[in-house]
Image (tube, grey):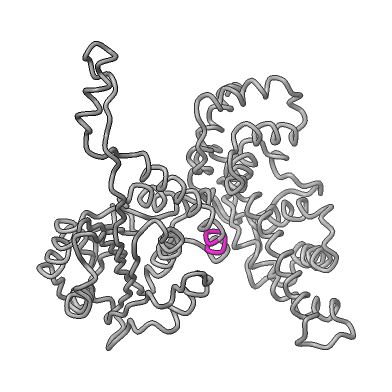
Amino acid sequence: MSLLDHHVAFVDALRGAGLTVSLAEALDAADAVRAIPLDDREVLRAVYAATLVKRQPHRRAFDEVFELFYPRVWGSGITRPDDVRQAPPPWATDDPDRARLREQLRQFLLTGDDASLAELAREAVARLGALPGVGSGPGGAGGRPSWSRMTVLDRLSPQTLLAGLLEAFLQDSERGGMAEQVARSTIASRVARFERLVDADVRRRMAQQSDAATIARDGVRPSIENVSFLGATRNELVELRREIQPLARKLAARVAIQHRHGRHGQLDFRRTIRSSLSTGGVPLVTHHRPRRPHKTDLVLICDLSQSVTSFAHFTLLLVYALREQFTRVRAFGFIDDLDEVTRFFVPGGDVLDAVARLSAEARVSWLLGRTDYGRAFTLFNDRYLDAIGPRTSMLILGDARSNYGDLALPVLDDLAKRARHAYWLNPERRSAWDTGDSVASKYATIVPMVECRNLAQLGQFVKGLPV
């Protein structure tokens, strides 16, 4: 593969990871690469990052793809002369490589010295991470090995080193106090750093056995705004929460501009004709009466069951950050009971605290605690029908999985007809709709249903929401 082909494949992989790279930016990057010495990998990384990465949250995905296409080492990547071998079985506690690597890992977790950490991770994968390849015979011979992150971490078991490390950290300090909390946090961050390096080396080896583009597509986590709400890890959920407020500010500015300039009022016929006299009676410019200020009410009906709760929480966070763009926002949550949760979002209060209180105090579960859309719509119709009117946009959040219960389609149809607009945001992939107990198609015949799995899709929807 030529250098240009490699560059094109790298840019395509970045796009697949969620980075927005235009053709002009890709050409700029190619021109910049021509102007630097290609034997300095970190300069190459900096040039590509400067020309292709526009937002800091994209940097993690960029670095992971860069490591696949421009790896620091090739092959085994270890300095010891003996050959890489298949990982020993879990019960082989007397394995000398395992004992030596655990001691090196313990020293790193104790001192935090990063000098040889990357080499330690590479050797751990080489010694302990190889699995028998397809077509391999006894002893793993006869086929290319595959590589396993979990095998490495299970064999090294960093968590089993914790007790001895705490003793070394604390020494004469009292257990259970602030010193122990700091020590545990320090050890956890160092373990996470080692695990990330093991992940990177496993992906590097797999990319060299197949191709970098395939591993980048299947093995690199997307940029944070493209991470699925339903599949996010704990760390990604924290990062998503950090992204909510900047996204809300950006969307609020765009919505305000569109609201101010996006639509004209009624044509002012007299002013248009009068101004056309200066152009020979040809109305080159039309004039419009000032549009009457108008904001809509917003009503949210949220499925708060365990399967979609993170999606509902992020949508509530974003919408309440944008509440100034609406006349009034009312929110209702349900599982198999319905409760208005507007009271948890006090103006000027912390929205994250509001979501935490909502989870703990909202009366959304009744008898079985299983999602019941039909009962929720019926209860809303009985208790809160006054919330829906001709100025209301109704927004339903949920996966449309009814647990095979009554759907209350006529009730939902009446609610949708009373509202000015009605939308349904579904956090599942469209390909999963109507599988199992999903009744997405039936509800979509009444309320338009939109796939909304991540922050990017949520932002696009809110941007187009009429105000």
From what the image shows, is residue 36 above or below residue 207?
Answer: above
Magenta segment includes 102: no
Q: Residue at x 24, y 70 (%)?
A: 387
Most frequent secondary structure within the magenta stretch: helix
Q: Residue furthest top?
A: 280
Question: In the image, residue 357 lies at what x, y percent?
Answer: 47, 79
From what the image shows, is residue 50 above or below residue 187?
Answer: above
Q: Is residue 407 visible?
A: yes
Nearer-the-camera pick, 87 or 438:
438
Question: In the image, residue 366 lies at what x, y percent?
Answer: 29, 87
Question: In the image, residue 205 lies at what x, y percent?
Answer: 62, 45
Nearer-the-camera pick, 304 or 219:
304
Magenta segment includes 240: yes
Question: In the image, residue 410 lies at what x, y percent?
Answer: 9, 68
Query: What is the magenta range?
Result: 237-241
Q: Residue at x 22, y 15 (%)?
A: 282
Nearer-the-camera pick, 208 or 298:
298
Q: Quadrant of residue 3?
A: top right
